[in-house]
Image (cartoon, rainbow, N blue to C red):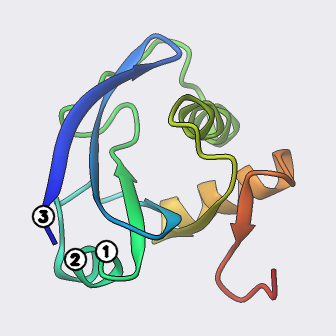
């Protein structure tokens, strides 16, 4: 499936966003090693889901905003990103740091995450 790469601004920070596919919404959050682009598993997921794969603020081509101090800031940023993209609900997955951020997002908002790996929701 074709995908797009765009730069979007949320909470004053411009970040890189990869997106592609169609179907239920899925947000993939990368690990501490950074975002390596539209990987084969994102391509596979995009055959069943509309995939949103943002690059965290402070990584790669994304801005490093002065307000980004801890994991809570990153969780709130991604909740704001989901709201800005009109994602009322989405499946959340992440690797390493991204999994931690996804869990922190679920703690802070019970409405937006549809399911986390290992959950029954």
Q: Is residue 31 visible?
A: no
Q: Is residue 59 visible?
A: yes
| 55 to 81, vertically: above or below | below
Tell me which corner region of the image, top left, top right, bottom left or bottom right, holds residue 101: bottom right
Position in image of residue 78 (x %, y %): 57, 40
The residue sitting at 27% across, 82% down in the picture is 41
Q: Nearer the viewer, residue 33 or 8?
A: 8
The residue sitting at 64% across, 31% down in the picture is 73
Residue under label 1, please give it: 46
Q: Disc 2 on helix, strand or loop? A: helix
Residue under label 3, please give it: 2
Position in image of residue 25 (x %, y %): 52, 62
The residue sitting at 83% across, 47% down in the picture is 109
Q: Nearer the viewer, residue 67 or 116?
A: 116
| 111 to 46, vertically: above or below | above
Residue under label 2, please give it: 43
């Amino acid at each position: 499936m074709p995908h797009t790469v765009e730069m979007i601004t949320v909470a004053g920070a411009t970040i890189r966003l990869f997106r592609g596919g169609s179907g239920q919404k899925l947000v993939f959050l990368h690990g501490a090693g950074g975002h390596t682009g539209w990987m084969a598993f994102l391509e596979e997921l995009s055959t069943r889901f509309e995939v949103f794969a943002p690059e965290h603020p402070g990584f790669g081509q994304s801005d490093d905003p002065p307000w980004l101090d801890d994991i809570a800031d990153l969780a709130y940023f991604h909740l704001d990103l989901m709201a800005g993209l009109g994602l009322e609900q989405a499946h959340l997955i992440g690797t390493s740091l991204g999994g931690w951020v996804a869990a922190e997002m679920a703690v802070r908002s019970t409405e937006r995450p549809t399911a986390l790996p290992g959950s029954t929701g």
